[in-house]
Image: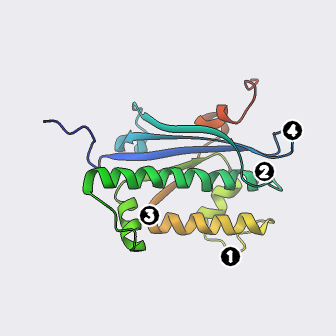
Amino acid sequence: MATLIPAVDQIAVVGWGDAVWAARVTGESQGGEIVVLAPLRFLSGSTETVAPVSWRSCRLPRVARRGTGAEVQMMTEILDAINYVRRLIYELECGPVDYTSKRHVNDAISACPGVLVTDGKSGHDAIEKNEPAGLELRDKRTSIECLGIRSQKEQTALQIRWVHSDAMLADGLTKDRPATV
């Protein structure tokens, strides 16, 4: 009998997260996310068919002071979604995760490659570059979220990639009308 789920080391979980600062009438920011399963070749730039597993458009949990704050909030939201799917794949393929051991949870998540895709250059750079604790950001809450994402990246072998806005798949989930070209 053929296995319905590819081996945990043959697929990747890729999530695109986008945010629009203060786009709502109330001044709150709008976010959008798409999570897909993709063959590993996709991570090397190969054009592949992917399987969407979740998507949503949402109001961000906190009012952001700047655009970077909104983008980083959405990065934390998509990180949670990516890690949930990575953990689920591990459990389907390998069995239950020992939730009493943080190391086992992180190892389980790390078993399936994960990629977080953002078009927020400031947030991406704050996480990826070896900056001091303040991360050169004006908003301290955003700095703390960046440090949390950086920590998760290191503990779970997460890749974080920046794309230009035209390559942001979640862009359509943050706008109330089509973009003008």
- Earlier residue among tags 2 and 3: 2
Label for residue 133?
1
- Earlier residue among tags 2 and 1: 2
Label 2: state its secondary structure.
helix
Report the residue at 41% width, 34% height from top: 51
Viewer-side label of 4, 2? 4
Q: The residue under label 1 is which amino acid type?
A: Ala
Coordinates of residue 37 in the picture (x, y in percent): 41, 40
The residue at the far left in this view is: 1
Q: Residues within 10 Å of mark 2 (few under 14, many from 20)?
A: some
Label 3: state its secondary structure.
helix
> How far separated are the C-alphas under marks 1 and 4?
34 Å
- Give the residue at mark 4: 25
Label for residue 156?
3
Report the residue at 27% width, 51% height from top: 93
Against 180, residue 121 (above or below) is: below
- Earlier residue among tags 4 and 2: 4
